[in-house]
Image: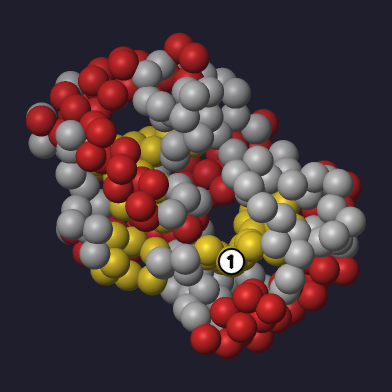
C-alpha cells in the first residue's frame, strides 16, 4: 500500500456500521486517527444528510458528505454544494412502475421524505410507524418539491420485476441497496460520480482515494476509486469490482485497512 492516498470514503450500513447501526470502537478510532493525520473522510451513502451529519458529530470529525447515493454533496458545514435531481417526468414514470408491481414508494427531498404503502402491501419498512396509504402527498411533491431519490421497497420478486421495468423504460440509475430496497437517482448519478465531482472540487486525484462498500450501489464506487475495498459480506458483484476484500464489519474491516495508511 502506498502512502500517497489522501481521501477515505466509506459506505455506512454493513460496511462502517455494525448490526446496531453504530461504528465499532476500532472503526471509529481509525477514522479519528486518519483525520488527525490529514486524511479527508467522506461518507457515501443512500441516507439523508441529517443522519450522516450526526455520525460525523459522534465521531468528532469534520468532512464532506455524499448522500442520496451520489445525488447530493454537502460540505463540512452541511451546506449542499452540488446536487442532481430527478425530473417530474422521471418521477411520474417510476411511481407508475412501483404502483404496477404493488410496491411501497419513498421520495427523498433535502428536508423531507414522502412515503406511500399500498393497502395490500405484504412487506413494509420497519421505520414506518404509520402506514400512509394515500398517494396525494407524493403526487403533489413530484410537482412542487425537488426530489433527489426515489425508492421502492417490498417483496423481492416484485422488486426484481420492477427493476427490469425501470431499466427497460427509463435511463435513471437503478440499484439494489438491500434485499428489500431498490433505489433510483437521475441518469448517470451514483456514488462514484459523487466522489469524482467532490474530488474535482477539492483538487484530489481519484487515484488518491480509498473506498469501502458492500452492496450493489457501491460497485461503481469501488471500481473507480484508487483502492476499492469490499467487505467479506459484500455481494459477489461488489467483491469482483473491488481491488481487495477484507473481513466484514464484525471484524472491523475498515479499521484494518485504514491502519495500514497511517
Q: Position of residue 51 (x, y in %)?
A: 39, 47
Q: Residues within 10 Å of mark 1 (few under 14, many from 20)?
A: many
Q: Is residue 233 above or below residue 71?
A: above
Q: Is residue 85 above or below residue 41?
A: below
Residue closest to the eye, 34 or 240: 34
Instruction: Name the foreground residue: 51 vs 232.
Output: 51
Q: Position of residue 160 (x, y in %)?
A: 83, 52
Q: Quadrant of the N terminus?
A: top left
Residue 258 sits in which quadrant? top left
From this viewpoint, is residue 240 visible?
no
- Quadrant for the C terminus, please: top left
Q: Which residue: 42% across, 19% down? A: 253
* Image location (x, y in percent) of residue 46: 50, 51
- The structure residue drawn at horizontal position 44% and vertical position 37%, both measured from the top left corner, is 12
Q: State the residue position of label 1.
A: 114
In front of the other: 48 or 31: 48
Q: What colouring does the structure picture have?
A: secondary structure
Say if 104 sits above or below 234 in the image: below
Give how far across and how far down residue 228 sits, in percent.
43, 36
Is residue 14 among what the camera can see?
yes
Q: Residue at x 37, y 55 (%)?
A: 49
Amino acid at each position: 500500500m502506498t502512502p500517497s492516498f489522501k481521501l477515505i470514503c466509506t459506505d455506512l450500513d454493513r460496511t462502517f456500521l455494525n448490526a446496531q447501526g453504530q461504528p465499532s470502537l476500532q472503526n471509529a478510532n481509525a477514522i479519528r486517527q486518519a483525520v488527525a493525520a490529514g486524511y479527508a473522510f467522506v461518507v457515501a451513502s443512500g441516507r439523508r444528510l441529517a443522519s450522516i451529519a450526526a455520525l460525523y458529530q459522534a465521531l468528532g470529525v469534520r468532512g464532506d458528505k455524499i448522500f442520496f447515493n451520489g445525488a447530493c454533496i454537502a460540505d463540512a458545514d452541511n451546506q449542499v454544494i452540488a446536487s442532481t435531481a430527478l425530473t417530474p417526468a422521471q418521477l411520474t414514470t417510476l411511481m407508475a412502475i412501483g404502483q404496477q408491481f404493488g410496491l411501497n414508494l419513498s421520495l427523498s427531498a433535502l428536508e423531507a421524505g414522502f412515503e406511500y404503502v399500498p393497502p395490500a402491501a405484504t412487506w413494509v419498512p420497519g421505520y414506518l410507524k404509520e402506514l400512509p396509504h394515500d398517494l396525494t402527498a407524493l403526487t403533489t411533491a413530484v410537482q412542487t418539491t425537488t426530489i433527489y431519490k426515489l425508492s421502492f421497497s417490498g417483496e423481492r420478486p416484485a422488486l426484481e420485476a420492477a427493476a427490469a421495468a425501470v431499466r427497460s423504460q427509463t435511463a435513471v440509475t437503478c440499484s439494489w441497496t438491500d434485499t428489500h430496497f431498490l433505489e433510483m437517482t437521475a441518469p448517470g448519478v451514483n456514488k462514484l460520480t459523487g466522489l469524482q465531482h467532490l474530488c474535482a472540487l477539492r483538487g484530489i486525484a481519484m487515484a488518491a482515494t480509498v473506498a469501502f462498500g458492500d452492496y450493489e450501489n457501491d460497485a461503481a464506487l469501488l471500481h473507480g476509486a484508487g483502492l476499492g475495498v469490499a467487505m467479506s459480506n459484500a455481494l459477489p458483484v461488489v467483491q469482483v469490482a473491488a481491488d481487495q476484500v477484507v473481513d466484514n464489519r464484525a471484524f472491523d474491516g475498515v479499521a484494518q485497512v485504514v491502519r495500514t495508511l497511517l
